[in-house]
Amino acid sequence: MPLIDTEAAPRVNGSRVIFALDYASLREARIGAEAVASAVGMLKIGLELFVHAGPEALALGKQCDLPVFLDLKLHDIPETVERAVGRAAELGASILTVHATGGTTMLKRAVQRAARAKDDGAALTIAAVTVLTSLDDADLAGIGVSRTAGEHAVSLARLAQDAGVTAFVCSPHEARAMRDALGGEATLITPGVREGSAPKDDQKRVATATKAVEDGASWVVVGRPIRDAADPRATAERLTAEVAAALAGRASRSRAEARS
Ligand code: C5P
């Protein structure tokens, strides 16, 4: 399996761990981010913090000298999404998520708007969310999807790739199938990362960071396991080291495969 080298965000300290700032206030988010800033590669601002603090939350990226992953999971008509992409680019986000289920036109317009923003100096990558890691096959059946979560995620990712998307959010369970389907250049971002015996919380399709990367992830997203740890910084450092070791292992396996 080829090692990805596409960068979805500027490499700051080499860490491929994205810390999800799922906090209720900007103050708590700042304390949480500053505690782990040197041990993670990106900060993720999701719905809770953005709804609470708005664009001000993106200043945390500059304060911590880290790129910002703006996880708004946009899903609306193409015009509305395109315009929101324009505003996110102005805010300096490095990655913005949209739902692949928004369809081809929405995805194309999001990608095209991000590309236009590059001409104005922004560096925004659109990432397509495939199937949420909190959903399993039974949940999908409940919303009328008869495919398995894995099949559905790969199919949505292919649709997004055809629309020009280069980064994809998926469960570690689909990472291998995604990597095989999308190729070595795709950026794969996997939330749903848990250490062996840790509580899964509301996540259903989880795996360890090592397994996620061995199977093809480029970045892992971690929220509660760092946020709620007794020592968040030590946990972030351990995860960063784990991901780095798994990426190095994957690179050497890939070189060995290329030689044989
Ligand atoms: O706390 P935990 O590590 O489960 O947090 C995972 C983060 O990743 C949350 O912020 C969640 O919104 C996000 N996410 C996810 N599944 C997706 C996309 C994003 O869990 N498919």
Image (tube, rainbow, N blue to C red):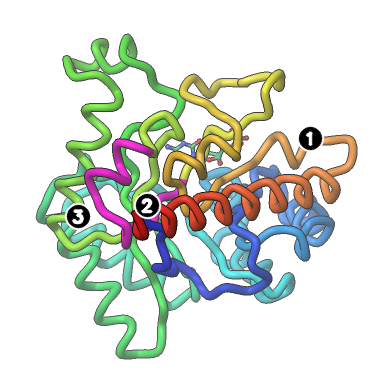
The answer to which of marks 3 and 2 sits earlier in the sequence is 3
Q: Label 3, label 2: how many angstroms apart (C-alpha)?
A: 26 Å
* Cβ of mark 3 under 8 A from ligand 1: no
Instruction: Classify residue 233 as left or right of residue 209.
Output: right
- Give the magenta part as a residue range: 176-189
As shown in the figure, which amino acid type bears the numbered disc 1?
Asp
Q: Nearer the viewer, residue 100 or 154?
A: 154
Q: Point out the tag, 3 or 1, that comes first from the N-terminus.
A: 3
Residue 132 sits above or below residue 81 on the image: above
Q: Is residue 161 magenta?
A: no
* Front in this rendered view, residue 117 or 24: 117
Is disc 2's CB within 8 Å of ligand 1? no
Rendered image: mark on residue 161: 3
Q: Position of residue 196 (x, y in %)?
A: 67, 23
Q: In which quarter of the image is residue 127?
A: bottom left
Question: Can residue 39 be seen in this snapshot?
Answer: yes
Q: Mark 2 points at which residue?
A: 257
Cα distance in 3D space between marks 3 and 1? 35 Å
Residue at the disc numbered 1? 228
Determine whether 11 is above or below 246 in the image: below
